[in-house]
Image (tube, grey):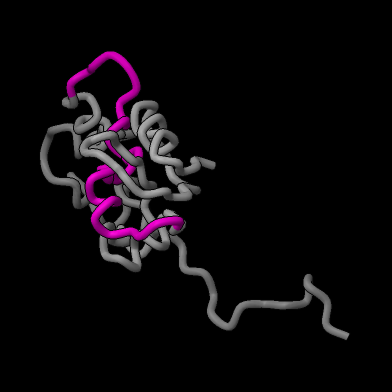
Amino acid sequence: MVQIHDIKPKTKKKGKKRIGRGGKRGTYSGRGIKGQKSRAGRKMRPEMRDTIKKLPKKRGYRFKSFREKAKPVNLAVLDKIFSDNEKVTPTTLLKKKVIEKKKGRMPAVKLLASGNITKKLLVSECQVSIVAKGKIEKAGGKVE
């Protein structure tokens, strides 16, 4: 039975060439003359840190712009496209080509109060502004 401590690699490990310790590579030992790169124990500063330091410091959380914003849809558009007692969801809006998928994902939808509404609509799975909610309920619709 083979055990984990019996397993050996096919190829032998080759050690790293150590430069600057006498022997066949004398004088500058392949390091060139002078400068930071020729010194013992040299540690170069990472480039990433330099780029980070060059970025301007601003107050607040830096990545607000990455947050996905809801797709705005006005009530006037809903009044044109939907019929009485129809359900309004992001999927129905997608089918009627009011909104499009963003990077293969269904976007968040927010209904805004621009325009008037005359039809009873059942709104669900959408964000709704306070004024828009009032207009939908006044027309006899429901917001879930």
> Quadrant of residue 82 in the image?
bottom left
Q: Quadrant of residue 72?
A: top left
Left or right of residue 100, residue 133 in this image: right
To which quarter of the image does residue 104 belong? bottom left
* Nearest the eye: 121 or 105: 121
Magenta stretch: includes residue 69: yes
Q: Quadrant of the C terminus?
A: top right
- Residue 75 image point, x, y percent: 28, 43
Q: Is residue 109 left or right of residue 9?
A: left
Residue located farthest toward the right when viewing the structure as drawn: 1
Residue plotted at (72% across, 77% down): 7
Identify which residue is drawn at 50% across, 42% down.
Answer: 142
What is the residue that sits farthest to the left in this orientation? 33
Q: Is residue 37 left or right of residue 69?
A: left
Q: In terms of depth relative to the viewer, which is nearer, 35 or 142?
A: 142
Q: Residue furthest top?
A: 59
Which residue is found at the position 39% from the left and 60% from the top? 105
Q: Quick one: 74 or 29, which is closer to the camera?
A: 74
Quadrant of image for the N terminus: bottom right
Direction from residue 51 to residue 5 in the image, left or right: right
State the image coordinates of residue 28 (x, y, percent, origin top left): 18, 45
User: Is 60 one of the magenta-colored residues?
Assistant: yes
For the view shown, which residue lies furthest in the bottom direction? 1
Query: How many marks on residues?
Result: 0
Residue 137 location (% of width, % of height): 44, 36
Q: Nearer the viewer, residue 34 or 68?
A: 68
In the displayed structure, would residue 104 be above or below residue 63?
below
Write down the region rendered in magenta.
56-85
Residue found at x 30% / y 34% = 43
